Amino acid sequence: MIKNFSSLSKSEQAKIELAYHQMKPEEFDDRMSKAETHATASVRLPGELVERLRVVARAEGERGYQSMVRKWIHERLQQEARMSL
């Protein structure tokens, strides 16, 4: 799994930023055309559940609860796919 930018050390972040700013426009376009696309989805959750998710996310070192939930959904889908074979 790719590390989140915010979890990298300051020196690693600086290297990535430098590479980004030195990138030619056509290189950037090529990289962006290969980037993963996301669909917008909304799930209404009770406020108490969201607060509990935030607490767990902080405890796990996640920046936000939504990225953690996305990761959980991905992991569960992989489990379900393996069980259906």
Image: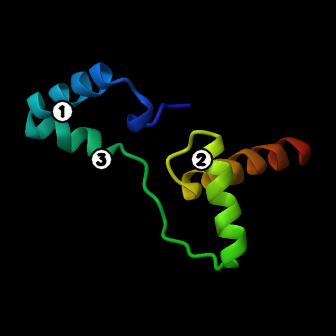
Q: CA distance from mark 1 to mark 3?
A: 15 Å
Q: How does the figure colour the protein chain or chains?
A: rainbow
Q: Which mark is residue 58?
A: 2
Amino acid residing under circle 1? Tyr
Q: CA distance from mark 2 to mark 1?
A: 29 Å
Residue 71's spot in the image, x, y percent? 63, 47
Asked if the residues shown at circle 2 and circle 1 are in contact, with their CB atoms under 8 angstroms apart, the answer is no
Q: CA distance from mark 2 to mark 3?
A: 32 Å
Query: Looking at the rendering, which quadrant does residue 55 occupy?
Result: bottom right
Mark nearer the N terminus (2 vs 3): 3
Q: How many marks?
A: 3
Mark 2 Cα within 10 Å, few/some/many (few <14, many 20+)? few
- SS class, disc 2: helix
Residue 21's spot in the image, x, y percent? 11, 33
Identify the residue at horizontal 45%, vertical 37% (top origin). Answer: 4
Query: Looking at the rendering, which quadrant does residue 24 occupy?
Result: top left
Identify the residue at horizontal 65%, vertical 66% (top origin). Answer: 51
47 vs 24, left or right, is right
Amino acid residing under circle 2? Arg
Q: Which residue is mark 3?
A: 33
Amino acid residing under circle 3? Ser
Mark 3 Cα within 10 Å, few/some/many (few <14, many 20+)? few
Q: Which residue is mark 1?
A: 20
Question: Where, quadrant-wise, is the N terminus in this rendering?
Answer: top right
The foreground one among 12 and 51 is 51
2 vs 45, left or right, is left
